[in-house]
Image: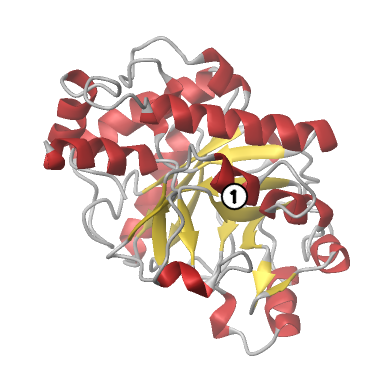
Amino acid sequence: MAIPLVLSLLISTVFLPGCISNIDYREEMRLFVENISRYAKNIDPDFIIIPQNGIELITDNGEPDGNLSINYTKALDGVGQESLFYGYDEDNKPTPVDEQIRLSRFLDRCEENNIEVLVTDYCSTHSYVDDSYNKNSQHNFISFAADHRELDHIPSYPVKPYNENSNDIHSLSDARNFLYIINPSAYNSKDAFLDALRNTNYDILLIDLFYDNDSLTLQDVNSLKVKANGGSRLVIAYMSIGEAEDYRYYWNDSWYLHPPKWLARENPNWPGCYKVKYWYPEWQSIIYGNNDSYLKKILDAGFDGVYLDVIDAFEYFENKIILDK
């Protein structure tokens, strides 16, 4: 959900958060992630925090060579990045070289500071898939080549996971590959879905907490923590914090006609997903901080960590300032 580079630079250099609005949208997202991390690690010190996209937040000025945002980066164990080499403008198309270079500069800095990088490229042509894995490996990034963006099945190519191994995986730094599958609708039952996952040798499974609106149990999640070859692995839960999804347990149907003040517009690219004013306490209390929160459900289900999506929601609000000006 990235905006074009030229517009992004315009936002970061001319329309700095706070120049027109009193809200620093980038800092508010940093604080949100930091508080999520603090809450989770107070419960489980080994719990893994991985925000996806919005990589500009790792530096104070949003530039690859800027000073690291210390509190933010200390809150992270890894970062996720979509479309580094394939899929930025269109699936199964190479990402523009200038964007590859820009993103890689941020991501290399993460690696230099012991923050693991997980890359999801969107490509299906076999030569592109091979190229994606090879290029990510050159940067020491852990990567997954998804053959389409719905993330609803296990790719048939390559036949075995890239860098397949039988090692025990105790941390992100141990991992050499991962599977990203958050839409299990292609499987006709929860058992069929879980069985398919159990029969793989991926080092990390990145999945949703829910199957058909039912939360996975502690027993379900623990059963996934062993690869088919016997090695242990990590199981990470997906959670969007920059958008509200109308198919989640927390959604109230009255919001369609009478949205709460923190609920913004529907994402035209992802029907049912609504931008949120993520700095509002009402939204944050849905996500973390209490026994009924989304994150507490993930912790209670025994996941090893959380993969935070729509971190780049700050771009939507910064862009809206420009368009409304």
Q: How is the image coloured?
A: secondary structure
Q: Is residue 33 left or right of residue 2?
A: right
Residue 224, quarter of the rendered image:
bottom right
Q: Is residue 195 left or right of residue 74?
A: right
Residue placed under numbered mark 1 in the picture? 177
Judged from this view, the residue extending furthest toward the right is 219
The image shows residue 322 at horizontal and vertical percentages of: 15, 36
Q: Nearer the viewer, residue 250 or 41?
A: 250
Q: Is residue 177 left or right of residue 167?
A: left
Residue 290 or residue 139, whichever sits in front: 290
Viewer-proximal residue among 64 and 273: 273
Can residue 295 be seen in the rendering of this structure?
Answer: yes
Instruction: Name the spot of residue 200 as percent of width and height, x first.
Output: 69, 67
Crowd band around label 1 with a 10 angstrom C-alpha radius: few (<14), some (14–19), many (20+)? many
The residue tagged with tag 1: helix, strand or loop?
loop
- Identify which residue is drawn at 35% across, 24% down: 105
Q: Quadrant of the C terminus?
A: top left
**Residue 45 seen in render:** no
Three-letter amino acid code of the residue under disc 1:
Asn
Residue 186 lies in quadrant: bottom right
Q: Residue at x 29, y 65 (%)?
A: 269
